[in-house]
Image (cartoon, rainbow, N blue to C red):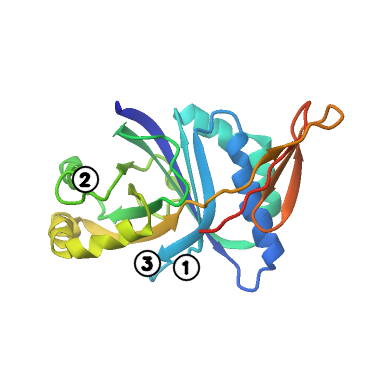
Amino acid sequence: MSSQQVIEHIVLFNVKDNTDPSKLDAMVNGLNSLSSLPHVLHLSMGPVFRNRSNSFKFCHMLHSRYNSKEDLKGYSDHESHLKVVRENVLPICDDIMAVDWVSEGLNGEIKIKPSSAIRVSFLKVKENLGAEEKADIFKVFGEFKEEGFDSIDQISYGENFSPARAKGFSIASLAVFPGISELDALSSNEELMNKKKEKFRDFLEGVIIVDYVVPQVVGKCLWIVEGWSLQVWNIRTIQFQVVNLEVQYSISQTVA
């Protein structure tokens, strides 16, 4: 499959302690429903499988993809997105960060299969780090799939172009694996992994690493009733959204 350029959008959320589970469900459901917005190539949202960063308590992650920065802006400015953020996200989250980057030469499918495992890494580089050193970091990311990490289906990396909510983290990478067992198998290549990290460890002030499993969606049906379109998005509760001129009833369940 030929390589392509895509815009990667990652958002990490920390939900307030003692949040009502129904409100958490509403946030997850609402954000997942945005996959139907124009220009969204891929979108999934769900709980973090493993947070490897002690400094941050992020517990949920959203990942989406777009053809262009303009398409990402269209998603961000869309009233449906703003409504979900206003009504379902901000009231229950006490920390949010977002990173966006252009992934050049992405190989594989734009849509990531359910049950795939994703490892996201955000790097905070030292002040005044030069372009040459950043290029060295990107070179290391590019070598992962080629040099002993055959379990990686897809790798994406780039420099953040939306610094406002990135907490100073300016470089990002995303590696996709067939499943969590393949991701965990990285430990068998620990020596090679450490050798790679040594090449840029001195350039860094901080690192965030999060593992995530794309939620498995099961069960779908379509109902046509009296000229209305009704789309149902469900994780553990059922929500309804009027769409158009037919009724679609869709049930999904997170099993990851």
Residue identifier under label 2: 145
For mark 3, give the secondary structure: loop
For label 1, the crowd category at 10 Å Cα-Cα, with few meaning under 14, some 14 to 19 and many 20 or more, is some
Q: Which residue is mark 3?
A: 53
Using the rendered image of the protein, determine whether residue 229 is visible from the camera's viewpoint: yes
Residue drawn where x is 52% and y is 42% of the image: 43
Residue bearing the label numbered 1: 57
Marks 3 and 2, the one that precedes in the sequence: 3
The relative height of residue 114 versus residue 244 in the rendered view (above or below) is below
**Dots 3, 2 in contact, CB < 8 A:** no
Residue reaching furthest to the right: 226
The amino acid at mark 2 is Lys
Q: Looking at the rendering, which quadrant does residue 227 occupy?
A: top right
Label 3 CA crowd tier, 10 Å (few <14, some 14–19, many 20+) = few
Position of the N terminus, as image quadrant, is top left
Q: Is residue 184 left or right of residue 216?
A: left
Out of 182 and 191, give the one closest to the viewer.
182
Q: Position of residue 140 (x, y in %)?
A: 18, 47
The span from disc 3 to disc 2 (Cα, nearest Å) is: 23 Å
132 or 101, nearer to the observer: 101
Give the number of the mark in front: 3 or 2.
Answer: 2
- Horizontal and vertical percent for residue 50? 41, 65
Image position, residue 9 (x, y; %):
45, 42
Mark 2 or mark 1: name the one nearer the start of the chain: 1
Q: Secondary structure at mark 1?
A: loop
